[in-house]
Image: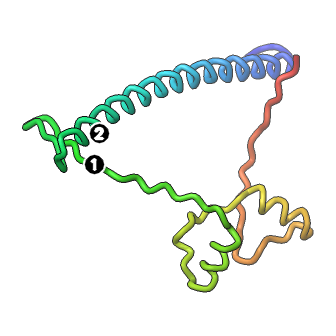
Amino acid sequence: MTGTPQDRLASMFRAHANIKAKQATANLKHKEAGNKLKFALEMVETGLLKMLTASGSSQLKVTGLAIVMPAKKVMPNCKDWPALFTYMKETDNFDLITRKMSSTGVKEYMAAHEDSLPPGVTIHVERGVSVRRQN
């Protein structure tokens, strides 16, 4: 790279913007294709479920190809977090939720407590850059 430091920086910014634009386009195309495939798969599965229900069987089979049988998906949703947390504390059953720290919550705690961390929490800080495009 030649030119002044400002020229090199401008070149890097242009490259960054170009890559981000291409990445956004690729992600959009990928998402659109994925959504179309997801919809098509849902339509086929709906048809298979209708055929299975109409047959009165517990399964349908094409030898050497596939077997279809009913499946249940359990998708929990909490409508009363305080009640759930009380239950988990009383029973020590914390397996009902995933164990993932909220970076926003930890940052807010640190801001309110002179950069100290909640008990049992450690942090890892990665250094990077944030590029904001100016028009």
Which quadrant holds residue 55? top left
Which quadrant holds residue 22? top right
Look at the numbered discs 2 and 1 and tell me whether their residues touch, using CB distance below 8 Å: yes
Direction from residue 80 to residue 92 in the image, left or right: left
State whether residue 112 is above or below residue 40.
Answer: below
Quadrant of the frame with the N terminus = top right
Nearer to me, 56 or 69: 56
Q: How crowded is mark 1: few (under 14 residues within 10 Å), some or many (20 or more)?
A: few
Task: First in sequence, mark 2 or 1: give its number.
Answer: 2
State whether residue 82 is above or below residue 54.
Answer: below
At which x and y percent is residue 24?
A: 63, 23
**Alpha-carbon distance for marks 2 and 1?**
7 Å
Q: Mark 1 = which residue? A: 70
Direction from residue 82 to residue 22 in the image, left or right: left
Quadrant of the frame with the C terminus = top right
At which x and y percent is residue 44?
A: 32, 30
Q: Mark 2 = which residue? A: 49
At which x and y percent is residue 68?
A: 21, 42
